[in-house]
Amino acid sequence: MTKKLPVQEIILTLQKYWSQQGCMLMQSYDTEKGAGTMSPYTFLRAIGPEPWNAAYVEPSRRPADGRYGDNPNRLYQHHQFQVIMKPSPDNIQELYLNSLRELGIEPLEHDIRFVEDNWENPSMGCAGVGWEVWLDGMEVTQFTYFQVVGGLQMDPVAAEVTYGLERLSQYIQDVNNVFDLEWTDGVLYGDIFKEPEYEHSKYSFEMSNQEMLLQFFESYEAEAQRLIKAGLVHPAYDYVLKCSHTFNLLDARGAVSVTERAGYLSRIRNLARMIARAFVAERKKLGFPLIKDEAKRQALLADDKEEK
Amino acid sequence: MAHSFLLEIGVEEMPAHVVTPSIEQLAQRVTKYLKEQRIEFGELKQYATPRRLAILLTDLADKQPDIDTEVKGPAKKIAQDADGNWTKAAIGFTRGQGLSVDDITFKEIKGTEYVYVEKHIAGKTVNEVLSGLKDIIMAMNFPTMMKWSTHKFEFVRPIKWLVALLDSQVIPFSILNVATGNQTKGHRFLGHDITLNQATDYEGALEHEFVIADQDARKQLIRQQIEKIATDNKWHVQPDEDLLEEVNNLVEWPTAFSGHFDEKYLELPDEVLITSMKDHQRFFFARDQAGALLPNFISVRNGNDQFLDNVVRGNERVLTARLEDAQFFYQEDQQVTVDEYVERLKNVSFHDKISTMFEKMQRVSVLATMFGQQLNLTDNELAELKRASQIYKFDLTTGMVGEFAELQGVMGEKYALLKGEPAAVATAIREHYMPISAEGELPETQIGSILAIADKLDSILSFFAVGMIPSGSNDPYALRRQAFGIVRIIADKQWHLPLLNIASVFSDAMKTASVVPTFDVTVHANEVSDFIKDRIKQLFSHQGIRHDIVEAATESTQSDIENVIEAQQAIDTAKNTDGFKASVEALTRVMRISKKADFAEDQLTVDAKLFENPSEIALHDQVAALSDHFAAQSVTAKLTGLLDLRTAIDAYFDENMIMADDEQVRDNRLKQLKKLSNMILSVANLDALIVK
C-alpha cells in the first residue's frame, strides 16, 4: 500500500474492476434498507433461472446501530459495496482477491483468511453459506453463496460479495476513527456524515413518533398485500422495504415488545415470500428474456407449461 | 506389484471445525469401499487442510483376487438327450456362464447326476475399482451442505480440483465439471500449481509450495512456534486444545506472531479479555509467571514471516477496537442499577410462546423459595436466595452481555459485586447456568445450586406446558441437557426434593403466587416425570449400572430423585449378600399377588380379628413395626427392613390361602399384602430385578 486511497477512489476502483468482470453497475436503490442484499437488484434478481451480474454501492441504515456519531466504528448508516453474480462463477474467490490487489492490498503482504460464516436473514426468508473474509484479523467482506432467497431454493446459485466500505477504507487509510476517513481530497467522512449520524440517532432512539410508525407499518403492509394481488411486484416490494425499515425504527426505539417482535418479522417474511414467487412468475410470463441461450430458455418455458 | 494411490479433493475453504471429521469420514468410506471390493492395501495416510482432503494408500494390490468357483447346472437327464447329445438346456446354461459344453463335468448329489462347470472369475483391476471412488466422494455428508453455480449437487464447499493418481497414472473420473488429474495447488498466495509425477510425491511437493498437508505435523509446528514466542518473552502460554485445532484448520502454512495491547485494558475482567482474544480473534493469550494476564497475545498467520509487521499491526488494531468497545460498555453498564436492568427484562423474551425473562424470574423465584424451605435454609440464606432469584438474569440487558453473549452469568457476578450485592447472590448468578454441558462443572454453592435447579426446571416445565416437548433428535432448547443437569446437581448435593411430581406442585404454586402468565403442566405430569426419570437412567448407565437395577430403582413410586439414586445404590450393595435372592423372591411374590387387590391407600386397614393363624399375626406385626418409622428411614434401612421380612412372608404364604372363599378374609389378606407392596414400591420395583 503505497498511496492511501480516499473512499471515493476505493468505490471507483471497485466499480471499474467489477464492471470489467462483467457486472452491470447499478445505482443505490432509493428506498431505505438495512443491507445491500435487500436492494431489488439482489433480492429479486437472485431469484429465478436468469443470469444476473451486478455491482453497486448501497447506503444501509440500521437504526439500532446508531451511536450519535460518538463511536469510532458504529454507524446508523454505513455503506456496502455489493456484488452479485448468478450463476456463481467458478473463480469467484480469485475475482474477489484480485479486487483487493486493485485496491493495493497485496495478499502476500497481509494475512487473508476465509473464515466460515453462514448468513441468514430470517425476516426476508434468506439463508446462505459462506465466509467472512479476514484481512489481518479484521472482517472486511461477507461472502455468501445464496441457498434460499424469499423462501425459494436457488437454481442456479448466486454468489454475493459484500464489502464493508467503511471498515475496508479504515484499513486502507490506516485510520482508527471512521469519521477521520478521507472521502476525497480535503473532505472527511465526518464532515459529511457526523451530523446526520447524530440527528438520525437522536431521531431513532428518542424522537420518532411511535404511533405514526406503527400506523405506517400497518398501512405499508396492507399496501404491499394489495399490490401483490394486483400483480405489481416492484411497487409491492418497495412497500416491503418500507415495512422493514419502519420495523427497524420501532425496534431501535424499544417500541416493539418481544412477543410482537417475532410477529412483525414473520409478517415481513410472508410478504417477502409472496413477492419472491410473484417475481419468478412475472419473469416467466416475460419469457425469461435475460437467458440468451435460446434452447435453454425454451426448455425452461416448456417446463413451466407442463407444471401448469 | 504393489501400488500407491493418491486421492485429493480440492475445495474452497472449509469451515475449520469440519476439516478433521471430514477427512476421517473420507478415510472410513474409502476403507470400507476397498474392503467390499476386495482390494488389499497396506496403509492409509490422511492429509487435511482448509482447502483439501487427501488420502494416500500404499501397498495397494494390482487387482481383486480371482475367484474359482463351481456352478451347478441342470440334471444330467435334462442336459443330455437319449443319444447323449447336449440339449438346449445344457448349451444355454454353459453359455450363461461364459463357457461351453466342453467344460461340463458331472457330480452326483443324492443319487442324481448333475451338470457342473468350473468357473473362473477374473478379479477387477485396481484401476477399475478406483474409478468407483467417484460415488464414494459424492456420497459424503457434512453438517452444512451447499449448492453452487448451476449444479444441483451438494457438498461442503465447491469442489475446485480432483487428483486421483495411481502411481503415476491418472484414474479418470469427473464430478460435475471437475475431472481428475495429476495437478494440485500450492498455498493460495505463496505457492504455485503442482504437477505430481508420483502419488507418493504428494507431501513433499506440497511442502515445496508452502502447504503442510499433514494436519498433525502442522499442529505440532504451530505448538512449537507458540512455545518459542512464549519462551523468548518469558510468558506463560497454555494453548487451548480446541483453539489450536481450529487455528490448525484455518492455515496451510502457519507462522505464529505476537502482538500487544494497551495496558489500560487490563482493568477489564479477565473473561472479557480472554473472550475478545480467544473467541473473537482466535488469539492465544499470555500470562506472567504469577498467572496474571499480560497485554500480549499470540496469533497464527496463514503465510510466511514476510511483511509480518502489517499483520501484527492489523490484528492489534482489531483487538484494540474490540477492547475499546468492551471498556465503553464496562463503564456505561456500571452507571445503571441492578433494578433498572431487571426492569428492562420485561422487554426481553424468554420464548415468544412462553413469557418474558422477567416473568420467568418470577416463576423461578417461587420455585427456588419453595426448594430453599424444603432444604431448611436459614432465614438469611432464604433472603439471599430470594434476592438472587429476583435479579439473576439482569446482565442480559447490559451492554457487555449484548456484545459478549458468552459472558452471561460471568458479567452478572462481576456487576452484582460492584453494585454491592451479597457475594452469595453474585456467585449464584454465575452458577445458575451450570452445568453448561452434559459433563460440565457443577455449581458449588447452595444458593447457586438451588437457583440452577429452579431455573432449569422452569424451562422444562414451561416448554412442556406450551406443548414444545422434545422428541427424537428434536430438542432445540436442550431441555434434556437441562434435566440431566438437575439430576447431576441433586446426585452431587444428595438433596431430597420431590421433583418427579413437580408438574402438579409447580402448577399449584404458580396459581397460589398469582404469577402471570400461569401455566398448567398437570396434563403433562407423567411426561415430565418420565422425562426426568430418563435422565436418571442416563446417569446410571454412565456409571455402568446393571440394566435391571436401573429399571427397579427408577420404576418406584418415588418422587424424590435422591431416593431413586439411593435405591439404586442400596440394591447394588445388597445384591451380593446372602439371602438376597430368596428375600427378593418373597417380596416380588407379595407384589404380584397384591395386584389383585384394588384398594386405595386409605382402605388398607387390616383387621386382626379376621386372622386365622399366627403367621398372619407375625407378618402384620412386623409390617406394622417397619411401617411406623418407614418414612423417616434411609432408603438403605428401608430396603434392609423389607428384605428381613422374608421368613415372615414365606410362612404367611405357606400357612394361608390368600384367595380364601370368605370374602372378608380374602380382602383382609389382600389389604395386608397391598400395604406391604406399596411400601416395597416406594423403594423400588423389585419385580424388575433379575435374580438368578
Image (spheres, rainbow, N blue to C red):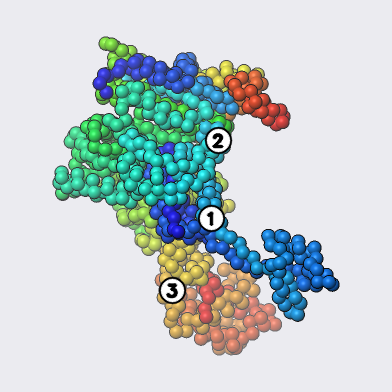
Q: Amino acid at mark 2?
A: His
Looking at the image, which is closer to me, B144 or A59?
B144
Output the chain of dot 2. B
Pointer 1 residue: B125
Q: Quadrant of residue B316?
A: top left
Pointer 3 residue: B572
Output the chain of dot 3. B
- Between circles 1 and 2, the one closer to the viewer is 1
Give left or right: position of B102 versus A209.
Answer: right
Q: Position of residue B476 (x, y in %)?
A: 49, 46
At label 2, counting other C-alpha atoms closer than 10 Å, the crowd grade (few under 14, some 14-19, many 20 or more) is: some
| Callouts 3 and 1 on one subunit | yes
- Between circles 3 and 1, the one closer to the viewer is 1
Do the numbered discs 3 and 1 sit on residues whose CB atoms are within 8 Å? Answer: no
Distance in Å between CA atoms under marks 2 and 3: 60 Å
Pointer 2 residue: B151
- Secondary structure at badge 1 equals loop
Distance in Å between CA atoms under marks 3 and 1: 59 Å
Q: Is residue A19 above or below residue A306?
A: above
Q: Position of residue B420 (x, y in %)?
A: 25, 41
The answer to whether one can see residue A76 in this image is: no
